[in-house]
Structure formats: structure tokens, C-alpha cells
Amino acid sequence: MSALTLRIAVAAAALFLAEQGLAQEVDHSAMDHSKVDHSQMDHSAMGHDAPPEPTPAAHDHSTMDHAAMGHGMVAEPKTPLPAITDADRAAAFPALTTSHAHHSQWFSKVLVDELETWEADDGRALRWGAQAWVGSDLNRVWLRSGGERVGGVTEAADVELLFGRGISPWWDVVAGVRHDVRPGDGRDYLAVGLIGMAPYKFEVDATAYLGESGQSALRLEAEYEALLGARWVLQPKLEAAFYGKDEPARGIGQGLNTLEAGLRLRYEVRRRFAPYVGVAWERAYGQAARLRRMDGADVSDLHVVAGVRLWF
């Protein structure tokens, strides 16, 4: 066999085998996929993992009786509760008594609320205000004093001896006598007043006086202590004095005589000892102001003070 003939035979054989292979391939483009029943297909044989079988629910909440579980409903007691009577209410809420137990033990205190100095026009000035008491929590004896010296001369001074009786946990009624050392000659008054702490912790002292020659007077004091820290205390104070009639010889006018206001900041080195600085303002009104002008004195005065507060 010649070489040409051999080549022709090999080419014919290869062509035949190629045609046989093409005939066995599936023509997927001609397949009708809508007619394929996928439910009958074995996907596990196709190499894909089958999805896990769904597990049945442990509880079917749609059929559960929530009322039996106590949700949203209150189970009726087996034994019905009896109706509440007036005797039950009286036993649960007994009437409260307002009586307080008072101690028979005696106490005492001395307070120097103001002991201060400043530089006045007529020289160094000194002012004091002090009180002391002794007794029980119900009955007390009070001793009070206040005054002012300017340039070594006492311009005003008084002392009071009072008996006090507690009428509530915060208030005492006091009654006694007051003696004015200055201004003018000494003068005595009968005194009655109220001492205590008003709402919001305002300390109040209101005292009325009836003196010789039908003179009457009223003294009102109010102060407050604002804590600015563990040792710093800011104390505003207001004091007013009223008189029933004019007394030119004593520099007293009818109505509002003087009004004093002060603001003091103290540092409590100890609770019993506290130096302070502050400002004090005083003004005379009405006839008292006219009498001061006639004497060439100032109607009002504003000064810076320094002092100490102590108690024992």
C-alpha cells in the first residue's frame, strides 16, 4: 500500500469516529424544561447536599392555653376573701397621738453671734450681740444683750432677762424684762416675744416691748445660714426697730426707726470658733432720720466689718 492510500484511510476512520461521538451527545437546547419533573430527580446523585429535614416545633403556641399558665388572668382563690370592715381599717391605721416625751435633764448654751469691729468716722467701733440660756427642752431662762461703742463711747446697749416655754418643736414663747443702758438714761420695758425657726430654716426673733411713759417698741430679726462648704458659712441678716411715739431726747422717732442689713462670711476653724468678714448697712427713717440730720450725723452708713463668732 502506498503512503497516499494509507493517509486517506486514516482520515476516513477519524471522520467516522467523530460523527459517532456527536450523535451520542444530548441536545439540551432542544429540551423542553417545562416538562421536566424535578420532583422525581435524585439530586443527591448530582453532587448537591440535600437541605435538612424540618424539625417539628416543640410547642404549638397557637394551641396553648395561656390562661392555664396564669398569663393575663388572676386565678380565683379556692376560698373567697372576706370583705374589709371598719374594724380592720381601724386596726391597720391606729390614731396617732401628738404628745412628745420631754426630758427633765437641763442643758445650757452661750452664743456670741456678733463680736465685730470696723473703722468709723469717730474712731474704732465695736458691736456685740450675744445670748445665753439654761433649762430643759421645754422651759428655759434666756439672757440676751446687744450694743455698740464708737470711739470708746457706748452709744447703745441693752440687756434682757426672759423666761421661755416651748410651744412646738421649733418655737418658744418668751416673756420678761428689758433694760436699756443707752441711749439716754436707763429705761425698763416689759417684753414678750416669739423665738424659733421658720420654714426654709430662717431663724426669727420677734419681740414686743412696753416701757415707761407709755412708750412701745417692736424688734424684728431674721437670719439665715447658707452652707458653702464643710467650713464656710454665709449668713445674711435683717433687723428692724419700730417705736410707738417720738422721743427726741433719745433720738427715737415714731414708726420705723432703723433698718439694718448685714452679710457675713465665716470660716469655722471649729464649730465653736469661727472668724468672719462682712458688710453691714444701717439707715434711719422718719423722725429718727430728721433727728440725725439735725445733729449732723449720717442718715445711713455702710461699713466693712471683721469679727468672730463663738459658742460654748
Image (cartoon, rainbow, N blue to C red):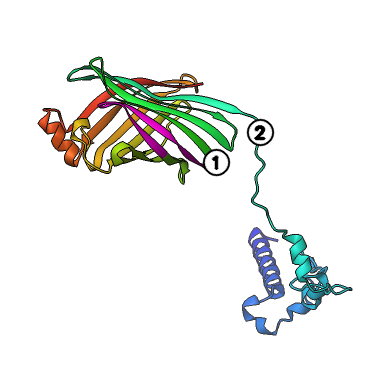
| Residue toward you, 106 or 301 | 106
What residue range appears in magenta? 166-191
Q: Residue at x 81, y 68 (%)?
A: 55
Q: Is residue 25 above or below residue 117?
A: below
Q: Which mark is residue 104?
A: 2
Q: Quadrant of residue 112?
A: top left
Q: Secondary structure at mark 1?
A: strand
| Lower position in the chain sequence, tag 2 or tag 1 | 2
Residue 233 x, y percent position in the rendering: 42, 29
SS class of the residue under badge 2? Answer: loop
**Depth order, front residue of 21/244:** 244
Point out residue 303 in the picture as x, y percentages from the top left corner: 23, 26
* Quarter holding residue 49: bottom right
Distance, label 2 to label 1, CA atoms, is 14 Å
Asked whether, in this view, residue 203 is left or right of residue 14, the answer is left
User: Magenta: predominant secondary structure element?
Assistant: strand
Judge whether residue 188 is colored magenta: yes
Name the residue carrying label 1.
Answer: 166
| Residue 105 appearing in the image | yes
User: Of the residues shown, which amino acid type is indicated by label 2?
Assistant: Ser
Name the amino acid type tagged 1.
Gly
Q: Quick check: 274 left or right of 3? A: left
